Image (cartoon, helix red, strand yellow):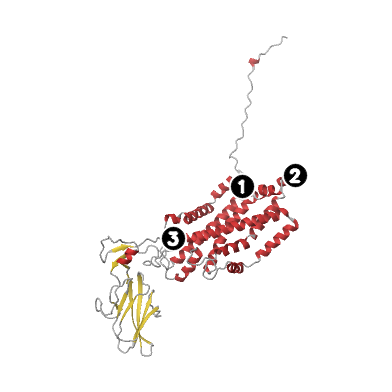
Amino acid sequence: MSATAFASRDFEPLVHTREAQSISRPSLSYWQDAWIRLKANTRALVSLYIVIALMAFTILGPVVWNVDPSLQDLDQISIPPGTDRRATLVAPYQPWDGTTFLEVTPGLRLAEPATTQSIRLLWDPVEGLSGYRIFRNLFPVGPERALGLPLAEHFSAQEVTFEDLLDLVPGRYYYSVLGVNEFGAETQYLETLVVDVSRVITVDDAMVRGLIDEAAELQLGDVLILGLHPLGTDYLGRDMLARLMAGARVSLFIGICAPFLYVLFGVIYGSAAGFVGGRYDQGLMRFADFVVALPFLLFMILFKIVFGIGPGESGIAPMLLALVVLSWPATARLVRGQILQIRQEAYISASQLLGAKTNYLVLRHMIPNTMGVILVTLTFAVPSAIFTEAFLSFIGMGVAPPTPSWGSMCNEGIKTMLTHPHELIFPALLISITVLAFNLLGDGLRDALDARMRSTE
């Protein structure tokens, strides 16, 4: 049997195909994955945008709205947003002798059209009375006869005119006249007159406020447009928007600077206590427990005395010092707990075997691995500090007028809450929005920075 020879060309090489496994998604770092999960949290993302908008409102707002927050517009006092800004040009004020009037009608009436310059009233004399009392109210007079502010008292039954020059602003007033007998007792309710007041301005005042110049050809009765105040003015005629921006600088400075300082100190203190351990750890944490028990308001008062800050003066520095001195233990406890957990990890033991020094272990491994807890703590600390500043300023122990802050503006606005609620609503609304935004952002960061929640797909 002869052997058959096979050439290599008679064979075709067998090609072995193998499908390579592809990674379904690229590898992400810890911070990249945290950012993706933060963006998936709608509430946290909206809160982040609100915080950015507040920063822009604080920093860039005064550049866009360049109005002095202490400048007073005496023609527009306590006006709400959207108020009519028209003013009629009139002649300078002339005293009224009580004998000139437009028409004779029975009862309580206006002698001239009511303006912010003056309101002149006239009524008929009543037999058997010895005088009259005049009242003014901002609200309608009901059956209970709440007549409002007493303006004047006439001691003659024939004195039947009255001119009101007291803090007149555009709006509606309710004037009432009561008769009194010879003993001064109110014996007869005459009438209540509803008066609608229009805004006027003299030529000299318009020139002083820059509304017209000397070359302007205007006549009495022409209408001028007063300065714009998008959010109205306060009880002294100061622009609310400008004061809210100035108050944001104070409130957010305290709300961010103080937490940054005491969180930083708490990180250092807690890291040292957790890394050293043993008796030193116990001693350091017992001191932290002692600081927690210290009363904040008492130290605030003591620091104001030490700094020489008297009643009616702003206590920003004592407030910052009190927050930093008394608020760090919570951060120290959290960081200590994280350090105690991390120091048991295998990579820490390996670094120690390789000769890593204490500073390297703390700064390179331990603190970076606690950054999630630190950032969340800082985010939750900011609204707490803002609320503390607002509370202290509200009770008169923090920022004092005329320095604006949201808390001090609320303190001023509550005095006119019933008549001019916008003076309280705007600063209170900003405090609420800021505190809510930082709290929701902190809640979202807590979920995003939790390593146990990292995606595994």
**Front of the two marks 2 and 3:** 3
SS class of the residue under badge 3? helix
Tell me if mark 2 has few (under 14), some (14-19) or many (20+) residues whose alpha carbon lies within 10 angstroms of its own: few
Marks 2,1: beta carbons within 8 A: no
In the rendered structure, find residue 353 and report the number of the disc placed on it: 2
Q: Position of residue 91 (x, y in %)?
A: 28, 69
Residue under the point 69% across and 54% down: 272
The disc, 2 or 3, on the residue closer to the chain's N-terminal end is 3
In the rendered structure, find residue 242 and report the number of the disc placed on it: 3
SS class of the residue under badge 2? helix
Q: Is residue 392 above or below residue 150?
A: above
Residue under pointer 1: 454
The residues bearing labels 2 and 3 have C-alpha atoms spaced at a distance of 61 Å
The residues bearing labels 1 and 3 have C-alpha atoms spaced at a distance of 44 Å
Left or right relative to 33: residue 283: right
Q: Is residue 192 above or below residue 252?
A: below
Tell me if mark 3 has few (under 14), some (14-19) or many (20+) residues whose alpha carbon lies within 10 angstroms of its own: many
